[in-house]
Image: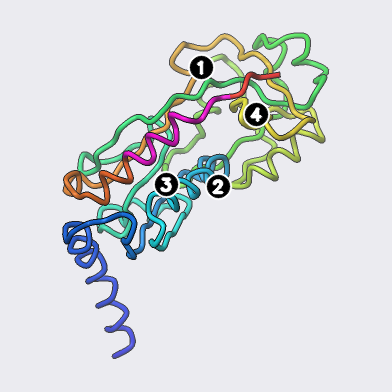
Amino acid sequence: MAEKLAEAADEMYSPLIKVVESYHNFDPKVFTGEVTIALNIYLLEQYGEGIFKVLQKALPQARFKLVYWQEKTLVEVLNGQIDYLLQLSGFPLPQDIYQHKLTEVKLSLIARNDHPVLSKSSEWEDIHHLPITRILIDGINTKRAPIEDLYISKGYNANIVLATHSLTVLRSKLRNSDAFSFGSSFMTEDDSELSCYPLPNLPKAMRQIGIEGGYLQSKRGFPLHQLLHQTMQSYFNSVVQPDGR
């Protein structure tokens, strides 16, 4: 019991310690606290390395946790255990969390080079039967994935053959089959076997997706959280989306 109480005390006082450190002559170059960033799993795999580099540069003495978003993550954000979050636009978050759009990413269809169908057409009537892969997004309790709703709205059923948390696994499936994915040209940047193909007819709002950062409204005045916001914005301002092949 004593051990459990000690662990609980550490968790209880950790947010308080961050408040004190944040206001007490805050100097990012000598800040030694722990910073926890929660990211949508796709964003973690796609941008995690670059984000970690800029965070290390901004806070060279700090300790970091970069974790992927799970069902319990929102509670951890509200409890002050997560310092900053990165999610895709449209992800439902309460008003207790201050959100700001960092960038927008253009979407396309991603599939293997010289795809037998997509290299000729991206019209719905030509592609609706093709197998699809998608990244799993935890923390959203819906009966169907957004891509399934999209297909239903067009009068089709989505043939999802792979749903995974791993971008590496998803890319492997795309390289070795006729499956495709709704994604961005970033997925083809370091993969010579994958190409971008035009999107089918979609509303303008669905042809791109935003990336948003956020943290507790109650921490908007904290120097540490202001620094995290500025660092993230600066990073995404520097990222140039590659042209799709």
Cα–Cα gap, marks 4 and 1: 13 Å
When the figure is inspected, residue 219 is found, relative to residue 11, above or below; the finding is above
**Residue beneath label 1, please?**
207
- The amino acid beneath tag 1 is Arg
What's drawn in magenta, residue-wise?
Answer: 230-241
Residue 96 placement: quadrant: top left
Tell me the SS state at disc 1. loop
* Residue 233 belongs to the span the image colors magenta: yes
From the top left corner, tell me how far across and down residue 228 is, in percent: 33, 46
Cα–Cα gap, marks 2 and 4: 23 Å
Q: Are marks 3 and 4 in contact (CB under 8 Å)?
A: no
From the top left corner, tell me how far across and down residue 221 is, in percent: 16, 45
Q: How many marks?
A: 4
47 vs 61, nearest the viewer: 61
Pointer 4: residues within 10 angstroms few (<14), some, or many (20+)? Answer: many
Query: In the figure, is residue 194 to the left or right of 237?
Result: right
Q: Earlier in the sequence, mark 2 or mark 3?
A: 2
- The amino acid beneath tag 2 is Glu
What colour scheme governs how the chains and residues are painted in the rendered image of this protein? rainbow
Q: Earlier in the sequence, mark 1 or mark 2?
A: 2
- The amino acid beneath tag 4 is Ser
Q: Are marks 2 and 4 in contact (CB under 8 Å)?
A: no
Q: Closer to the observer: label 1 or label 2?
A: 2
Query: In the figure, is residue 147 to the left or right of 226?
Result: right
Q: Which mark is residue 139?
A: 3
**Looking at the image, which residue is at 68% across and 10% down?**
125
